[in-house]
């Protein structure tokens, strides 16, 4: 195999992204990664508006792809494949990137890979370091919260997932009740700085349960009730710190359970724990998970910050790894709003 040079496209939510990734001997090199954010267009509405997102993807994808190729110093002729997110996500947006990918594949006679966005997050830590398969993965984003055993692309086994909200969704919704702007997660982290997490007592959901599922709705309700009665900025700061600690605590406790089971099934092999997705950008979350992994004898890995939130480099890498295994898709690949791993 002579390696893969893949153009990746990501349009499943509110980021229009294109990237070029080179994969050689199992090692990834990001040649370019361009992310065009639509945050300013959605902010007045307090969240992502699907129609606005789809239109914005159409308007910007051309220029974003051109930039990604220019920054990589490559033309279409240098590519060995095209990978586009085909779901899960806002289907109007997914169709934009997938159609663009199909057009490039058809015009340039390149193989197309229709990538599952979650598989992109699953491989994202491999963009920054050489992390061999298999590993235990905590995927925490705005739409997803699950623990997976990852043996390679196309070989993920789900150990548990949220029974209500995703962790990022909990951050976003609670941030809103604290009067913070969208997107709430990063804003809540900033507000929580220096706060006293012990000032408010919040429910510890599913504590001690023997599975690897998650639940955040009780925390959300409790936090909203407390937020209503707050008067000072110091109180809001302390509540933000308490919420952040509670979310990080649950992620660590559930991951601890998963590590225990995973370690038994992988005796004598390298134990690796990876956290990926937008919430992996949170420093408190990372710190708690690092401690948990260390205590269980796992090495801890997280993608570089730029590859935690949505990007196209992770889509390009998932595509390149699939192409290396001979897994291409037809031009009849469909956009899927729902697509569990
Ligand atoms: O992976 P991502 O960009 O998009 C999805 O696939 O959902 O994740 C976005 C989510 C949002 O809910 C956002 O609030 C959260 O990740 N997030 C954070 C932080 N940065 C992003 N949550 C907490 N702390 C952060 N620093
Ligand atoms: Zn995502």
Image (spheres, rainbow, N blue to C red):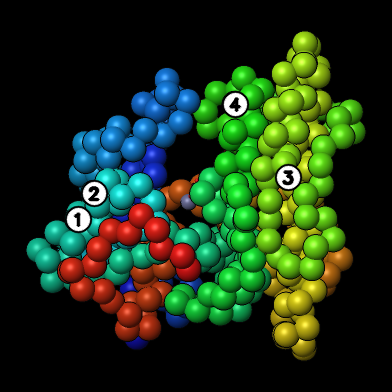
Label 1: which residue?
Answer: 99
Vertical comparison of 255 with 151: above or below: above
Q: Which of the two marks, 4 or 1, is nearer to us in this view?
A: 4
Q: Earlier in the sequence, mark 4 or mark 2?
A: 2
Where residue 17 appears, x then y in whole percent? 35, 47
Residue at horizontal 83 percent and vertical 70 percent from the top: 296
Asked whether the viewer can see residue 221, the reply is: yes
Q: CA distance from mark 1 to mark 2?
A: 5 Å
Observer-nearest residue: 211 or 84?
211
Kind of element beneath mark 4: helix
Rendered image: mark on residue 96: 2
Q: Earlier in the sequence, mark 4 or mark 1?
A: 1
Label 3: which residue?
Answer: 247
The quadrant where ligand 1 appears is top right
Give the left or right position of residue 100, taking residue 136 as reference: left
Kind of element beneath mark 3: helix
Q: Earlier in the sequence, mark 3 or mark 2?
A: 2
Residue at horizontal 68 percent and vertical 45 percent from the top: 216
Q: Earlier in the sequence, mark 1 or mark 3?
A: 1
Q: CA distance from mark 1 to mark 3?
A: 37 Å
**Furthest residue toward bottom:** 268
Rendered image: mark on residue 176: 4
Observer-nearest residue: 67 or 52?
52
Where residue 128 appears, x then y in whole percent? 55, 60
């Amino acid at each position: 195999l002579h390696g893969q040079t893949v153009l990746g496209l990501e349009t499943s939510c509110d980021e229009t992204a294109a990237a070029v990734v080179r994969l050689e001997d199992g090692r990834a090199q990001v040649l370019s990664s361009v992310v065009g954010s639509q945050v300013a267009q959605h902010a007045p509405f307090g969240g992502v508006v699907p129609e606005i997102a789809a239109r914005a993807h159409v308007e910007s994808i051309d220029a974003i792809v051109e930039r990604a190729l220019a920054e990589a110093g490559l033309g279409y002729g240098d590519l060995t494949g095209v990978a586009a997110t085909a779901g899960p996500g806002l289907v109007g947006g997914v169709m934009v990137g997938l159609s663009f990918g199909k057009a490039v594949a058809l015009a340039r006679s390149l193989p197309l890979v229709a990538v599952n966005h979650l598989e992109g997050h699953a491989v994202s830590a491999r963009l920054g370091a050489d992390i061999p398969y298999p590993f235990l993965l905590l995927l925490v984003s705005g739409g997803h919260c699950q623990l997976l055993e990852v043996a390679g692309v196309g070989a993920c086994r789900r150990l548990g997932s949220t029974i209500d909200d995703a962790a990022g969704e909990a951050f976003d919704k609670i941030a809103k009740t604290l009067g913070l702007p969208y997107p709430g997660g990063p804003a809540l982290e900033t507000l929580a700085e220096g706060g006293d997490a012990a000032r408010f007592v919040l429910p510890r959901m599913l504590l001690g349960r023997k599975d690897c599922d998650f639940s955040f709705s009780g925390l959300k309700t409790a936090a909203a009730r407390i937020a209503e009665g707050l008067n000072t900025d110091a109180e809001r700061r302390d509540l933000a710190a308490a919420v952040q600690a509670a979310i990080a605590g649950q992620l660590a406790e559930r991951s601890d359970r998963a590590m225990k089971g995973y370690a038994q099934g992988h005796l004598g092999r390298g134990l690796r724990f990876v956290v990926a997705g937008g919430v992996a950008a949170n420093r408190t979350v990372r710190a708690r998970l690092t401690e948990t992994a260390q205590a269980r004898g796992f090495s801890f890995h997280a993608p570089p910050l730029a590859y935690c939130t949505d990007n196209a480099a992770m889509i390009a890498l998932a595509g390149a790894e699939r192409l290396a295994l001979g897994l291409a898709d037809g031009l009849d690949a469909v956009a899927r709003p729902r697509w569990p791993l």
